[in-house]
Image: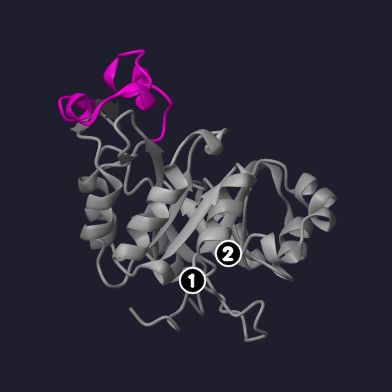
């Protein structure tokens, strides 16, 4: 892997290059309206759509492996109250997850993060959300960064989290890997930004689309890569594209890609 290759989502904001108009199409948990979220089938579908980036979630299980799963427990997708962190790998392999969406019954298996990294094609980057509030009690960040380094994917990964300490640990382990801070309250980040040493600030800010506006987007674009989540409405997609965001995270990656393809200049 070329160490000088384009990091995911980088548009030259900090380097002073011209910003591209077209936002990245970021597939939220793959293509979750067609295949079960956060499964290899869902990720493969997103890659077949030739999206720019796939967003996924990682956690650590009881036997130490890093797995791709969003919820803390299995209630929503396997009708079980068991916590993901309490499962062994053998137990996890025996679980089938399922959901019913768009009049379709979807099912699948919880994948290992390593397996997802190995299936990544040459053109698709990853936005990897680190789950969990107390990262200090797990080896999640250490293992995830190690897996990325082993496959020489540092320039293809954006580690994101609502937990700023998780991003601090990523920075401390490998400065080549970009980080993104997820926030439901963009104003709060700017209120505390001055207290964060510049060397530990994230490369990207990822805003909840319902609690941001053009003023906050414009302000963030001065110094950061900016993405918004989760945007499925066509009018909202057009709005954020017009505001110049770097990436739009969506459950409808194929639709967003087509919408951007149809827009003049995209």
Q: Which mark is residue 263?
A: 1
From the top left corner, tell me how far across and down residue 255 is, in percent.
38, 55
From the top left corner, tell me how far across and down residue 89 is, in percent.
22, 31
Q: Secondary structure at mark 2?
A: helix
Which residue appears at 50% of the width and 71% of the height?
A: 176
Name the one closer to the observer, 235 or 81.
81
Which residue appears at 36% of the width and 64% of the height?
A: 149
Mark 2–mark 1 CB contact (< 8 Å): yes
Where residue 145 sits, quadrant-wise, is bottom left
Q: Mark 2 or mark 1: which is in front? A: 2
Name the one closer to the observer, 79 or 19.
79
Q: Reading the chain from its start, which is encountered first: label 2 or label 1?
A: 2
Which residue appears at 70% of the width and 42% of the height?
A: 211
Compared across the picture, whether 4 is left or right of 61 comes to right
Residue 27 appears in the picture as rendered:
no
Q: Mark 1: few, some, or many residues within 10 Å (few <14, many ≥20)?
A: few
Q: Which residues are magenta?
A: 70-97
């Amino acid at each position: 892997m070329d160490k000088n290759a384009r990091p995911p989502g980088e548009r030259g904001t900090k380097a002073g290059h011209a910003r591209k108009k077209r936002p990245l199409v970021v597939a939220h948990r793959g293509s979750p309206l067609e295949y079960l979220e956060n499964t290899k089938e869902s990720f493969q579908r997103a890659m077949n759509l030739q999206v720019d980036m796939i967003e996924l979630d990682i956690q650590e299980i009881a036997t130490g492996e890093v797995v791709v799963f969003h919820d803390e427990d299995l209630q929503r997708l396997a009708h079980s109250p068991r916590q993901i962190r309490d499962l062994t790998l053998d137990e996890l392999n025996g679980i089938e997850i399922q959901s019913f969406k768009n009049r379709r019954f979807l099912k699948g298996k919880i994948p290992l993060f390593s397996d997802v990294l190995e299936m990544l094609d040459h053109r698709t980057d990853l936005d990897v959300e680190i789950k969990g509030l107390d990262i200090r009690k797990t080896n999640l960040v250490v293992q995830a960064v190690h897996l990325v380094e082993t496959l020489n994917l540092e320039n293809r990964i954006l580690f994101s989290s609502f937990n700023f300490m998780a991003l601090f640990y990523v920075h401390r382990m490998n400065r080549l890997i970009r980080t993104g801070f997820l926030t439901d309250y963009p104003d709060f980040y700017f209120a505390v930004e001055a207290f964060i040493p510049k060397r530990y600030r994230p490369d990207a800010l990822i805003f909840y689309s319902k609690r941001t506006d053009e003023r906050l987007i414009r302000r963030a674009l001065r110094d950061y890569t900016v993405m918004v989540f989760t945007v499925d409405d066509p009018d909202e997609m057009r709005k954020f594209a017009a505001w110049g965001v770097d990436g739009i995270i969506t459950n409808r990656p194929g639709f967003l890609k087509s919408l951007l393809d149809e827009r003049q200049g995209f």
